[in-house]
Image (spheres, rainbow, N blue to C red):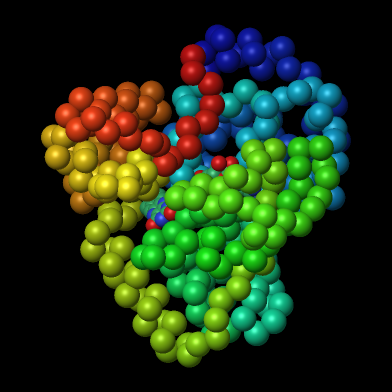
Amino acid sequence: MDERIKKHFMSLNTDPLQKKFGKNLIIKENLSKYSWFNLGGPADFFFRPENKDQLIEFLISIKKYNHKIHVLGAGSNTLIRDSGVKGVVIKLGSKFSNIKLLTKDTIEVGASTLDRKASSFAKNNSISGLEFLACIPGSIGGAITMNSGCYGSDMSKVLKSIRIVDYNGKEKEIKNDDIEFFYRGTNIPENYIILSAVLKGTISSKELIEKKEEKFIQQKKESQPSQIKTGGSTFKNTNEKKAWLLIKESGCDKYYIGDAKISEKHCNFFVNNGKATTAEIEQLINKVKKEVQNKTGVDLDLEIKIIGDEK
Ligand SMILES: Cc1cc2nc3c(=O)[nH]c(=O)nc-3n(C[C@H](O)[C@H](O)[C@H](O)COP(=O)(O)OP(=O)(O)OC[C@H]3O[C@@H](n4cnc5c(N)ncnc54)[C@H](O)[C@@H]3O)c2cc1C
């Protein structure tokens, strides 16, 4: 750990919070294991609440410190900077992973539930509409925030409502109609932590759902790499063209910086090929963005979220 980071940690008064929240609060937790890129430095405070009440108690307790707060889902869309995250990272762990059948076509899902588990639960209850979630490696909280989707579906189409707690510890329910969804995003305020969601599909036959799901998974296998350290699509597609096509046409698809590479199978997937740093991945992102802008005039927008502090 470099001197600046060491000094920063020494300046934090961590004792009172650590006493109160015990093993659920880790100081200087290295974040790389919580990101699909397998990259990132330490968080000042890493909090994994035991339950909703403890989360609320924590939010109220830290208010006076004015720490910046980040919420992490499964980390499949997040690149964490090498110097880590000053402030608090909250990750809803397994205690927020649960699924309940509410009516025959409607389920309630905890925010940390993996998308594929929600999809599988829906399938087992003959609920169609959530098959696309079998292809997305994140959590339900991340999927809602990102309005994640593929093959013509996205979260906006299946989400009925969410339960949230804001950074002041206030809880409320928000209905789909009160959320604005757009391509890979929503207007849900950044200071809302999604606790759970109600998802609605349509009743169908289990066999048909299974077929649809298998088709999606196959399509994914053919078009996208697997078993790599990545955040999926780095840039958003534009209305006119897919981001990967713009990257390819601009001649950037073979660019690399150290071990920061671009997937041979899908050139919008940027990869930590083993020993990359976040700085190298970011340099590669910026290099590609600049070149695409020069060659095509298109200013690509990031789909992945980059968190943490620049040195
Ligand atoms: C191999 C691969 C394939 C992918 N394929 C697809 C695809 O087909 N379609 C697609 O849309 N995406 C895809 N992605 C991207 C990614 O999986 C999705 O964006 C996913 O929904 C992110 O979920 P997560 O839990 O990992 O979120 P994270 O990366 O942890 O977080 C993403 C954002 O959600 C916020 N967030 C997470 N949980 C909560 C919560 N409980 N409350 C409030 N905010 C929260 C975070 O603060 C952050 O802003 C892919 C990624 C990979 C690695």
Residue 178 vertical placement versus 280 (above, below): below
Viewer-side residue, 22 vs 81: 81
**Does the image show residue 280?**
no
Residue at 33% x, 35% y: name it.
Answer: 300
Numbered label tally: 0
Q: Is residue 253 left or right of residue 118?
A: left
Q: Quadrant of residue 218?
A: bottom left
Give x and y (percent) for residue 243: 28, 44
Residue 122 vertical placement versus 255 (above, below): below
Residue 78 vertical placement versus 265 (above, below): above
Viewer-side residue, 184 vs 69: 184
**Does the image show residue 244?**
yes
Residue at 68% x, 78% y: name it.
Answer: 101
Residue 91 vertical placement versus 1 (above, below): below
Give x and y (percent) for residue 34: 53, 42
Give x and y (percent) for residue 246: 21, 40
Give x and y (percent) for residue 37: 41, 40
Residue at 32% x, 25% y: name it.
Answer: 286
Q: Is residue 306 left or right of residue 144?
A: left
Q: Quadrant of residue 189?
A: top right
Residue at 61% x, 29% y: name it.
Answer: 43
Q: Is residue 226 left or right of residue 14?
A: left
